[in-house]
Amino acid sequence: MSRVRTVLAMRTREGCAERFEAEWLSAAEQIRTLDGCLHQDLVRDADDPRSYLVISDWADRERLDAFGRSEQRDRLLRVIRELRESADRHTYQVLHSVAGEPGEGR
């Protein structure tokens, strides 16, 4: 088993970006406590404030898939689904990670 990363590209409905961010943070706080969830990021496109990436690292594909099939996932993400106009998800195996050196600007 190896670590996996999901990248979910989403575009919010007009006027929904602020609520989307708040709802994502609320859901992420609960998801982070789940077995296998290692890390989550929400990033916004610097040139399109309605476009986001949700990047999540999981210990393995089995635990990610178990969450993906769970009623808890449906409940936590119900509102987020209503706030978006599109979504496209991909799952990747993490092969290597290289951290930057600590220093100025970090």
Image (cartoon, grey):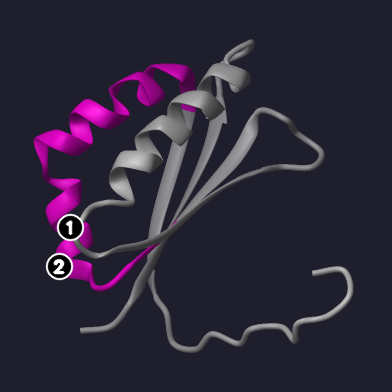
Q: Are marks 2 and 1 in contact (CB under 8 Å)?
A: yes
Where 47 sits versus 65, above or below? above
- Looking at the rendered structure, the kind of residue marked 1 is Asp
Residue tagged by mark 2? Answer: 62
Q: Quadrant of the C terminus?
A: bottom right
Q: Residue at left 10%, top 34%?
A: 71
- Looking at the rendered structure, the kind of residue marked 2 is Glu
What secondary structure predominates along the stretch shown in magenta? helix
Asked whether, in this view, residue 34 is left or right of residue 58, the answer is left
Q: Position of residue 40 (x, y in %)?
A: 45, 54
Q: Which mark is residue 1?
A: none
Q: How many marks?
A: 2
Q: In which quarter of the view is residue 101 placed?
A: bottom right
Asked whether, in this view, residue 11 is left or right of residue 79, the answer is right
The answer to which of 92 and 31 lies nearer the viewer is: 31
**Helix, strand or loop for disc 2:** helix
Q: Residue at left 81%, top 38%?
A: 47
Q: Residues within 10 Å of mark 2 (few under 14, many from 20)?
A: some
Residue located farthest toward the front when viewing the structure as drawn:
103
Where 46 sits versus 85, above or below? below
Which region shows up in magenta? 56-85
Q: Position of residue 97 (x, y in %)?
A: 54, 85
Q: Residues within 10 Å of mark 1 (few under 14, many from 20)?
A: few
Tell me, yes or no, whether the highlighted magenta stretch contains residue 72: yes
Asked whether, in this view, residue 16 is left or right of residue 31, the answer is right
Q: In which quarter of the view is residue 62 placed?
A: bottom left
Q: Which mark is residue 65?
A: 1
Q: Position of residue 18 (x, y in %)?
A: 61, 20
Q: Position of residue 81 (x, y in %)?
A: 37, 24
**Helix, strand or loop for disc 1:** helix
Q: In which quarter of the view is residue 15 placed?
A: top right
Residue located farthest toward the right when viewing the structure as drawn:
104
